[in-house]
Amino acid sequence: MRKVLWSPWLATFARVGLAGILAWAGLAKLLEDQGTRRRAILAYRIPGLSVDLADVLGLLLPAGEVLLAVALLAGIGVRVSALLTGLLMAGFIVGIISVWVRGYSIDCGCFGGGGDVSEAGRHARYTQEVLRDLLFMGAAVRLWLHPRSAWALQAVRGLPDYSSPQATAVPASASSKP
């Protein structure tokens, strides 16, 4: 079981799967008009969040998702990309739980759209969204712990491979002066 869990092919599946999800989510939101993105962010009712900041977040969050998708798909900086993806998913989970606990009924806007919606099915919807994002966060944690995967550009000779803490250490021969 351990061999399967830490297989480079499972890492490749996680990397490509997360890249696809992030690209879909980011592009869906970037292709929407500014008003739709603003409405989705303001639906979370974050105290002190201005309309101007909602507009900025409405561009930065999906652009960041697309950038993470490109990095994961290419296999560049997998450990850092996985860490940022995991933190992003944790933020999404906190946001969903926050509106759930406060009694609001919104479409999370995860794949476009967003805003207030009917109360019908709210608990099931939020449960599914939290479980989905926990799954994505688990894949990101798996990649962060063991990022080595097939078809990754970071495995190409000459590019840094940060797949283990030992890989970031400077070799003794490189640190000594000639």
Image (spheres, helix red, strand yellow):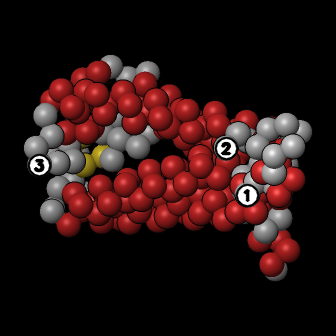
x and y percentages locating residue 155 in the rendered image:
84, 44
Q: Of the residues shown, which amino acid type is indicated by label 2? A: Gly
Whole-number angstrom distance, CA of label 2 to CA of label 3: 34 Å
Decide: is 60 above or below 126: above
Residue 47: image tag: 3
x and y percentages locating residue 69 in the rendered image:
60, 38
Drawn side of residue 110 relative to residue 136, left or right: left
Residue 169: image tag: 1
Quarter that holds the C terminus? top right
- Nearer the observer: mark 2 or 1; the answer is 1
Residue 158: image tag: none
- Whether tag 2 and tag 3 are in contact, CB under 8 A, the answer is no
Whole-number angstrom distance, CA of label 2 to CA of label 1: 16 Å
Q: Is residue 173 visible?
A: yes
Viewer-nearest residue: 116 or 15: 15
Nearest to N terminus: mark 2 or mark 3: 3
Q: Of the residues shown, which amino acid type is indicated by label 1? A: Ala
Tell me the SS state at disc 3. Answer: loop
x and y percentages locating residue 63 in the rendered image:
46, 29
Q: Residue at x 67, y 43 (%)?
A: 77
x and y percentages locating residue 103 in the rendered image:
15, 62
Q: Of the residues shown, which amino acid type is indicated by label 3? A: Pro
Nearest to N terminus: mark 1 or mark 3: 3
Q: Residue at x 35, y 41 (%)?
A: 109
Residue at the bottom extreme, as displayed:
1
- Whether tag 1 and tag 3 are in contact, CB under 8 A, the answer is no
Nearest to N terminus: mark 2 or mark 1: 2
In the figure, residue 167 lies in which quadrant? bottom right
Decide: is 14 above or below 152: below
Q: Is residue 12 visible?
A: no
Whole-number angstrom distance, CA of label 1 to CA of label 3: 43 Å
- Nearer the observer: mark 2 or 3; the answer is 2
